[in-house]
Image (cartoon, grey):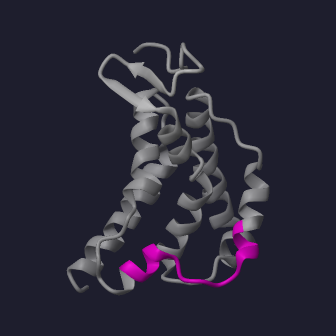
Amino acid sequence: MSDVRNPHPHDPVAVYDADVVADERVVEGALRRYGFSAERSWRLINLSENATYLVDDPGTRAVSRTMMLEAKRIAEQFGVHFRVDVERRIDGAGAVGAHKTSTLVDLENRRPMEIDPLLTVVQEMGRLVNEPTPTIDVVLALVKLRERMALQGA
C-alpha cells in the first residue's frame, strides 16, 4: 500500500492507494464522526434515549473510549487531527442529555439504520491503512444484529 498522506496538500483529491481515490473532505468528515459512532451505538444497543450510561458506567465508557481511540489512530493516518480529546468528547455526549437520534428512531420504526456512515466507514478505512479495529468490529456486529432483529420483527 502506498503512503496514506496526501502528497499534494492543496489538491482536494488525494490518492491513498492505487485503487482508492478519496476526497479529503469525505475522509475528514467520516473520521470526525468518531464520537457519534460510540454514542449512537450505545443508544441502539441499549434502546435508550439517554447517554448518561456512556459517561457514568465504567464498562461502556471504557468500550467507547477504545472505539474512539481506534478511530483516532485511523484518522491520524489520513492526516486528520481532532481538537477535542476522547474524554471531553465522551463527557460532551453525556451532557447532551436524553434525545432520540435518527438511528434510534429508525430502529424503533423497524427501518434500516444509517450505520454505514457512522461505523462501517471507519472500519473500512482502518482496513485501508492496516489499522486493527477490534472494538469497532464487535460493536458494529452488535448494532447490525440489533438492526436485523428489528427488521425481522424480533
Name the residue: 54% across, 46% down: 29
Residue 105 location in percent, x, y? 43, 82
From the viewer's perspective, is 21 left or right of 85? left
Residue ID at (35%, 69%): 113
- 150 w.r.t. 15: above or below: below
Report the quarter where the N terminus lies.
Answer: top left
Relative to 60, 102 lies left or right:
left
Q: Is residue 138 visible?
A: no
Residue drawn at x 24%, y 78% is 151
In the image, farthest residue toward the left: 152
| Front-lying residue, 150 or 114 | 114
Question: Overall secondary structure of the magenta stretch?
Answer: helix
Q: Residue 63: percent from the left, percent from the top?
A: 60, 58
- Considering depth in this image, is 9 or 140 the residue closer to the camera? 9
Magenta stretch in the rendered image: 93-106
Whether residue 5 is visible, yes or no, is yes
Instruction: Tell me, yes or no, whether the highlighted magenta stretch contains residue 95.
Output: yes
